[in-house]
Amino acid sequence: MRVLGIDPGLTRCGFGLVDVRRDRRASLVAVGVIRTAPEAPLERRLAEVSRGIRELIGEHAPGAMAVERVFAQHNLSTVMGTAQASGIALLAAAEHGVPVALHTPSEVKAAVTGSGTAGKRQVATMVARILGLAELPQPADASDALALAICHAWRGGASPASAGDGLGDGADAAASLTPAQRAWRDAERGSRARRVAT
């Protein structure tokens, strides 16, 4: 399963491509940022982000795209730029027939580290460990994009046994989970149980 993760932004739009096998082992395909000049007109900046994402899709043919869900921030200009870049990513995916999923930052942190409140360095450290990288991926936008891709692959079914939570219930599937995956699976199941109870 090849997933393109997008950490949307106007000045730096992070991207990360990973291949995830059926045993949930992940490998790096590509990582980086699409940069635009802050002083450039908005329409040109959006066009550059769009071109960069389309080139990634055309070159690497991902089977899915994971985009960080935009949430309210105190800085209105920042959240507007993030939302605009997110819309560009969603449009590019739709035009190429790539399925898209939106994931919140806390969901991604929980999937990768086992804690929804993990810091950026902790996320980067776990991403490097999961992908077998010698160094932490830089900058943070690129690291976050890789975490998004990993989160989606683990949740979305890199294993045929993954019907409900993306982390199968069979003995073989359970044995292949990392500690972070097990923590995330247990948190997801606990959340579902509470929703059913109410």
Image: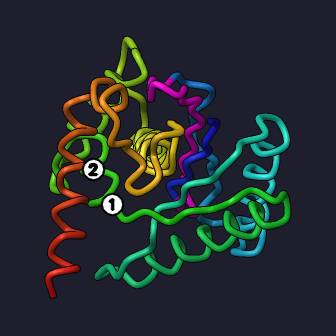
Position above or below: 54 against 195? above
Percent position of residue 123, x then y: 27, 40
Do tag 1 and tag 2 residues touch (Cβ < 8 Å)?
yes
Q: Judge the density around disc 1: few (<14), some (14-19), many (≥20) Cα neighbours within 10 Å.
A: many
Percent position of residue 108, x then y: 34, 52
Residue indicated by mark 1: 105
Q: Residue at x 41, y 29 (%)?
A: 137
* Count of picture labels: 2
In this picture, which residue range is highlighted in magenta? 8-26
Q: Determine the secondary structure under disc 1.
A: helix
Q: Judge the density around disc 2: few (<14), some (14-19), many (≥20) Cα neighbours within 10 Å.
A: many
Q: Residue furthest bottom?
A: 198
Q: Residue at x 42, y 39 (%)?
A: 143
Percent position of residue 65, x then y: 62, 53
Residue indicated by mark 2: 109
The quarter of the rendered structure image containing the N terminus is: top right
Position above or below: 112 against 138? below
Position above or below: 131 against 96? above
Percent position of residue 125, x then y: 26, 29
The quarter of the rendered structure image containing the C terminus is: bottom left
The colour scheme is rainbow
Is 178 in front, or is 57?
178
